[in-house]
Image: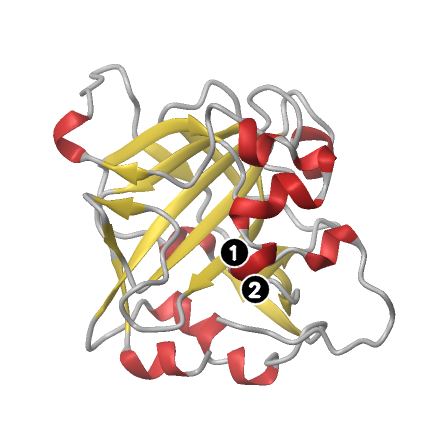
């Protein structure tokens, strides 16, 4: 998914990076020395997941997300589509269980689409790329004050990854996003979402893969517990074509 930042002022390092080309992931560590982990880190994400090499851990618990809805803003950041929750007076959505030792507070969702229907996900499974990937981010609210604080701290971030597959019927909650994509084609555009139930995005499964990795944008801090659900949710060809 390509976007144009509709501004004429000089871009800062925070805005200049991209997901492809000469400002893509392979060059992030060269663009800015403060992003050196992107090139030199030992636990960088995304990864190719190989189910045959995974270890079963009987001590892992089911993943839990609060069911209630929240309001927020869907934005084209110039790098992609992000839903940011309004952390004002509303009750936060908590993420717990699974491999997590702490309670995490939902912060934002990233939508990753590709330039074609076949390759959009950041994570791959046995080298297979899915058409899209949704990443649900939260921060450790028992140890840290906010997402920014937790981003570079131990056990700071959780990312729940949903892999999207093409289908005739899409996830109903996902349509709350895709129905608005045509309104935020350009960088800086935003749309208010009055109610969104994060839990309703999840597929009907208790099984997942998990590993300790990094965020997948500069500065690639290796503070993220990834939880990749082992069952996809569905998106239609028409929804993908909106990008």
Q: Secondary structure at mark 2?
A: loop
Q: Quick check: 30 left or right of 136?
A: right
Q: x and y percent of residue 228 in the render?
A: 33, 40
Figure label count = 2
Ranked by sequence position, the earlier of labels 1 and 2 is 2
User: Tag on residue 80?
Assistant: 2
Q: Nearer the viewer, residue 70 or 152?
A: 152
Residue sitting at x 31%, y 54%: 163
Q: Nearer the viewer, residue 136 or 198?
A: 136
User: Tag on residue 173?
Assistant: none
Q: Quick check: 178 left or right of 184?
A: left
Residue sitting at x 69%, y 46%: 31
Q: Quick check: 76 left or right of 94?
A: right
Whether residues under marks 1 and 2 lie with C-beta atoms below 8 angstroms apart, the answer is: yes
Residue 198 visible at all: yes
Q: Quick check: 6 left or right of 219?
A: right
Residue beneath disc 1: 110
Q: Secondary structure at mark 1?
A: strand
What is the image's colouring?
Answer: secondary structure
């Amino acid at each position: 998914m390509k976007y144009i930042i509709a501004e004429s002022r000089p871009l800062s390092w925070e805005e200049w990076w991209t997901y492809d080309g000469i400002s893509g992931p392979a060059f992030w560590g060269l663009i800015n020395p403060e992003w050196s982990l992107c090139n030199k880190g030992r636990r960088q994400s995304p990864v190719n997941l190989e189910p045959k090499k995974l270890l079963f851990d009987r001590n892992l618990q089911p993943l839990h997300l609060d069911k209630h809805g929240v309001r927020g803003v869907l934005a084209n950041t110039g790098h992609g589509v992000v839903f940011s929750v309004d952390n004002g007076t509303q009750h936060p959505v908590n993420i717990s269980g699974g491999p997590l030792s702490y309670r995490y507070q939902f912060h934002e969702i990233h939508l990753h689409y590709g330039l074609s229907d076949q390759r959009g996900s950041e994570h791959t499974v046995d080298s297979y790329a899915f058409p899209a990937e949704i990443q649900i981010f939260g921060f450790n609210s028992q140890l840290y004050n906010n997402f920014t604080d937790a981003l570079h701290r131990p056990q700071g971030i959780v990312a729940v990854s949903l892999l999207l597959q093409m289908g005739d019927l899409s996830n109903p909650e996902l349509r709350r996003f895709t129905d608005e994509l045509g309104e935020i084609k350009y960088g800086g555009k935003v749309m208010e979402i009055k109610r969104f139930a994060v839990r309703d995005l999840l597929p009907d499964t208790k099984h997942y893969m998990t590993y300790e990795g990094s965020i997948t944008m500069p500065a690639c801090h290796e503070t993220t517990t990834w939880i990749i659900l082992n069952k996809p949710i569905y998106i239609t060809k028409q929804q993908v074509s909106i990008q």
